[in-house]
Every structure is written in C-alpha cells, then in structure tokens.
Amino acid sequence: MADHDCICTQDKVKEYLELMAKNAGISDLTDPALAAYISDSDGLRHLRDLFHYPKCGSLPDVDASLVDPSSDCIYLCGHSLGLMPKATERVMNEQLQKWARMGVYGHLSGDLPWAYCDEAAIEGVARLVGATKSEVSVCNGLTVNIHVLLTAFYKPTEQRHKILLESRAFPSDHYAIESQIRLKGRNPEESMIVMMPRDGEECLRTEDILQKIQEEGDQIAVVFLPGVQYYTGQLFNIHTITMEAHKKGCLVGWDLAHAYGNVPLQLHYWDVDFACWCSYKYGCTGAGGIAGLFIHDRFKEDKRDRMLGWWSHKMSSRFQMTNELDLDEGAAGYRISNPPIHLVAPLMGSLEVFNSVSMDDLRSRSCYLTGYMEFLIKHFFDEASPHRRSKISVKIITPAEFHERGCQLSLRFSVPIDLVYKELTKRGVAVDKRYPHVIRVAPIHLYNNYTDVRRFITALQVVVLSVKGDKNGRSFVTEFENRRHDYGVHVQHYIDVDPNNVPTLSSSFEVVTSNIVLLYAGSEIAEKIFNDLKNTTISKVWLINEDASYSKNLPRGSKPFEISLPKHLRAVTVNDPPFVYSIPASNPNDCQGLGEVEVPLSGIDTASVPNSSIDRSFQFSLHLNDSYGAVVVSHDSRDFSLSGALWELDNDKADLAIGGMSVNPEREHYVDFSEPWLYHGIKILEKSQNPSVSTMQSFLQPLQSSLWTALFVAVALIGLAIYLLDLSSPFHKFYSVKLITENGVSSNQKYWKTPIFIQNLKKVNLR
Ligand SMILES: Cc1ncc(COP(=O)(O)O)c(C=O)c1O
C-alpha cells in the first residue's frame, strides 16, 4: 500500500477545473459560478447536510452591515473544532433520555450500554487510523494519552535516554515530553532533541529527520512527532520515519491530533509503535471530545509497566473486585477509567458520518478542494502574481506537495495577522490565527464545498484592500496611543513618513535620545529608512512590524549600547551663585552661548579610573532655568504642576538638575535627589502670630489643656475611691465605732448617697 495515497497534484487540480469549466461553459477558472457548478455536481455534496452548518448571524464578531446574517458563514476552522453532525444530537438525546428513564441500569441495558460504550466505537475508529480492533482504545484526552503512552514506552537507560521531537511541537506535547523526562529522573536539556527546520524554511525535511535519527539514533529512546504539524499543516512521512527509526532501535510514537479524520492512516501497516489523537477537530466530536490511542499488536501480550485503573483489567473478571489485576490485552489494557458516555455519544454520531463514506474518497475530495483554494490564493495574492490588486501578499507555508499536507493551508501575510483576522471575522469567516505569523484555513472534505472556498477568497480580497488602508500605520498608531498610557510609555518624538517621498531622516534623528524606536512601515520604506539611518540604527532597539522585517538591510549584529547609557546628558541649573557650574574662561567671549560643552575629563579623578572605561564621546550640555521650581498640588490632591528645573526634569527637557536645591518631601515625590552634599544646622525662625501670653497661660503652657483636664478627673476619682474604701473598712469594728458616719450616713445608705457626695465633692477642698 502506498504511503499517504495521494496521486493529486496542482496540475491535476487545474486540469479538473478546466474540464469542469468547459462543461459549464465558463471561461474564467476563478469565476464564482464555476465554484457553484462544481459544488452542485460534487458526488459527496450530500455530506454537508449531515452537519449543522452555522449562519453568519450566529457568529459573535460578525458585522451585520457587511454580510447577510441569514447566509451560511464561511466555516474553514475544522482543524480547530469540527462542526456538529446532526446524528450526534440524536445519539446524545437518546442517552440523556435513557439516563432519565432508567438511571444506573443504563450501564448494562439499552442499545449502547454505558459500561462498554467505548467498545462500540472501536471498529469505526480503527478503520480511520488503519488499525486492528485490538490496537485501538478510546479514552481520556489527548495530552493525558501522551502521558499514558510515554509512561509505558519511554524507559530511558544510560545509553538510550533521548526523545526526538520538533521545535514547533504543540506546547502540550512539549510539556508532556519535558515532564516525562524529568519524572524519569533525567534532565530535558540532555534528553530532548528538538529539531528545527533549516534556516529560512518553515517545515522539517524528511531527509533531515532521517539524518538526525542516523546520527543520534543509538541514544534515542523514542521518536515522537506529529502526523500533521498544527502550525504549518505539514504531513509527515509516518511510514518512512518509523521504519528508519526502527532500524536504529528507537520506538516511534505519533501525535495524530491533526491527522485523525483528515488523511488516511495505516498505523498497523506502517508498523507504528504507539500513537494518540483527539477527535474534536476533523473527528467532529465537539470541544474536549474523547481521545484515542493506538498500540501496535506487536505489544498485544506485552505487560510492561504503565498507568493502571480498573478499566485496564479484563472485562470478564473486572467486577469481581479482587484487586488482583488481570491485564486486558493490547490497547484495551491502557484504559484507566470507565468510559464517559457523554463523550462517547458524540463519537458515535461522528462515526455515523465517517462510516457512510470511505476515507480514500474523502481524501480525494480534500486534495481537490484544498488544491482549488491554493490555486485561488496564488492567483490573487501571491507576491509574483500579476493578478494581485493589493499591496498585501500571501505566502502559503504549507508544503506544496499534496502527499506532504492534509486539508489545512497556513497563510503568512505581509501585514500583521491580527489586522487580517479581525476583518475576516467581521465578514463571517471562521478561521484561526496562530502566532507568530499564520492564519490557518482548512476546507473540510466532510462539509465544505467549492463555493465556501470561493467566498473565502472574495472576503479576503475585500479584507486586504481594507487592511491596506493601514499601510502608513494609522490604526497601528491609534491603537498604540490608546494603550501606551496604561503602561506609562513616554513618546519622545513622532516622525510621519510619506511613502511616496521618503525624506532624509538623519537630521530629525539627531534629537532622538530615546533608546527604543518603534517602526511601522512597508518593507520597501523600511529599507530606505534603515539605509538612511545606517549610523544611528546601531545604537537603538528597533521594534518593527512584520512587513518592515522583510527589509533586506535590517540592523543586526551589535548589541545596542545606548540602552543603558545615553550619549547626551542634559543638565539644567539656576544662576544662583555660588553653586553655579563654572567654566574657566580667559576672555569674556568664552562665556557666550553656554550651549553644548565638552566635559573636560581632567575634572574627574582620572588617575583612579582606567582610561578604557570612560566613554569620551559622551556629550554634556548645560543650560539655565530661572528657578529650581516648586510642586503645586491641587486641592483634591489629584493633580499637580511643576515649575522651573523640576518641570524640565519631568518633561524630559533635562536629564539632571544641578544646584543648591533643598530636599523636601513634595519635591522628592516627583524627582530623585542625589545624596545631599551639604547638611547645615541652620534653622528657619518665624515671627510668632500671638506674642502676648498671660502668666497663667505661661504656667499652663508645658501641658495641653486636655492633659490638664485628665489630670483633674484622675485626682477626683482617686479621692472618691479612697473615701469608699474607707467607709467599708472592717477596721471600724475593732474600734467599736458606730456604723454611722460623721455626716449621719449609715453603711447601707452610703452607696445611695454617693452621687450626692460627688456633687458635694466639688465643694470639698482637697488637700
Ligand atoms: C498537536 C496537538 N497536540 C496536543 C493538543 C492538546 O490536546 P488536548 O487539549 O485535547 O489534550 C492539541 C490541541 O489542539 C494539538 O493540536
């Protein structure tokens, strides 16, 4: 059996279009009428009706003034989430109703007993991946299955401990591999071989992978690669890579997230050791749908250590609950938990569609559909195409060879993808963007047709024209302006360049002391700017847009030295002798134009500083201001204004202020002071507002009036306490004194009389 059976080529697509155009009596291959004609005569067109196909009006970012909300949207995002098969709704509802009707009995009764529901899907799934039934399980999520498989198959030894993966591996795969290496007590830096495409290329070449395996195969425990690469859409040569890696004694595993349901697979025949996939992309099982795994029959009897659960146990004795594991065979023995019916039901729904058509027919349809899209993109947007109407060009980074790709094309634009993506979504186009550079589009062989593809091209034609309006960076600058305040970014200078007449910028750049330059320009203009600023660019950090990055003379190579050291130091001072900066002058003319002055290095203790560490090109300039300035804060403390030298510092007119300025909290709030170089003991004396003070006032002055009051109250309370203690004292008995007080109050009465006492106390002369 041939690998990735695809005998289609771009020439064949063209031949097919020409034939169909002839049949339809259409002369232009890009004519939307041709797309409509092919869609109508397509033998698999009925598949679209098996799906719920969304309308423009139900997509969240659609602008109803640009598209008819009741029309079909342009759904080209099945590589991310496939559309919902109508059958799924039915199967799901059946299971929900069964649950409502019979509760726990649903585990073993009904047409899809939940306890074995996953097994009902095995045949269909095995067919899609080219495996025997014992080689496939459906369980868990994709990343969990990567862990399940690597836990069992990655058994590093001193000699063989490396895992070969690709540099753009999906983050989840990368993390899973990294963590597995650590969990096995090894260091990812030593045990991960991360393969990068060649310089200037997007995709890995099979020959380079094979060479790497040849070179390092003896140390490679596992080769783990994607069937279809998520970013570029590249379809790897699974068979050849697996065979070559086996020759070197490596195990080979594949992440088939973007291959399952997309391209025909022959995992058994290709001798793949293990593989896993998710089912929610081309498999159309809904977000987070159940994943699958493949273990070659070679390992059917193999009882290697792995992650276990009660579902790893053979069904025949599973429920005897003996805690003595009777491991199930093949892929079934890698299951852990009981199958989730709410995830299996959508899988059953999707298999109803896949079972109604052969994967080869789907692949053939897919090749022509994607080939048609490629033809139109090249026709209208390729940089070299005479039909390109917009400045914006599109490059397809997915391999051009049909046997090296599935249905996805990854498009790289000559402008930032966000701009294009936003405009597309407004027009009812569902695609996705993947940073750093691509928009992924995939006409899906199950439910898309030629008209969807042609409508996408029309939308893109409009979009590139509207995005083109930003070629001078207007909306970029507006967006930047809106956001920079949140981050406190200060802009020193804006330079607007007319694209038709790029001026010489070197003179405007002389005043630019900022270390960071933000450039938004087309590649040609950027090239002129970099040329013009050859000497200046080197000392700056340039943040540039993608298009500008295509300019051939990008400043490169040297570390910007100005990032921490400005070349100019602008000092401000106040004519305030004796603290003024002075320059020895031999005649009065020397004192004129106190503008830019070279600092004489002799003024520094050069003896103790190595000559090489002083930057002699440093420019020092000094100018005068009338005052050091003050901080005036508004009444509600929300606003403030600065004046004099302080204002200059705050407004970036000076880097430094020199002078005898006193350090006070208000000033410190807005500027940083150096350590004071003079502490003087001088106090400021102020004339009192109320000089005449009476003798009594001067007696009371050391204590505040509140303290005096507290003192008097304390004395009164102590007196009262002593009096009360005295009255209830038992010593009266010993002295046989009548329990009548001097003022005739009995001991029972005394508590009642206390308030009166307190009143009278005021009259008592305390001694
Ligand atoms: C290539 C690849 N690997 C792994 C994942 C992670 O899948 P999951 O979140 O289902 O574990 C994805 C998800 O899109 C993927 O595309």
Image (cartoon, rainbow, N blue to C red):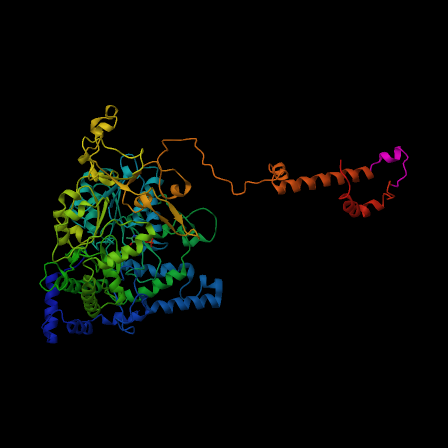
Q: Residue furthest front?
A: 692
* In the image, residue 520 above or below residue 64: above
Residue 184 horizontal side relative to residue 538, left or right:
right
Q: Where is residue 307 shown, x and y percent of the image?
A: 38, 46
Q: Residue furthest bottom?
A: 25
Q: Quadrant of the C terminus?
A: top right
Q: Where is residue 216 shown, x and y percent of the image?
A: 21, 39
Q: Where is residue 81 shown, x and y percent of the image?
A: 30, 61
Residue 647 visible in the picture: yes
Depth check, front residue: 103 or 655: 655
Depth check, front residue: 723 or 588: 588
Quarter-wise, where is residue 261 in the image?
bottom left
Residue at x 42% of width, y 59% of height? 115
What secondary structure predominates along the stretch shown in magenta?
Answer: loop
Residue 566 visible in the picture: no
Residue 388 horizontal side relative to residue 441, left or right:
left
Quarter-wise, where is residue 79 in the image?
bottom left
What is the total number of numbered labels drawn onto the structure image?
0
Q: Quadrant of the N terminus?
A: bottom left
The question of residue 334 being in magenta is answered with no
Q: Residue furthest top?
A: 607
Depth check, front residue: 385 or 641: 641
Q: Which residues are magenta?
A: 728-740
Q: Where is residue 78 shown, x and y percent of the image?
A: 27, 62
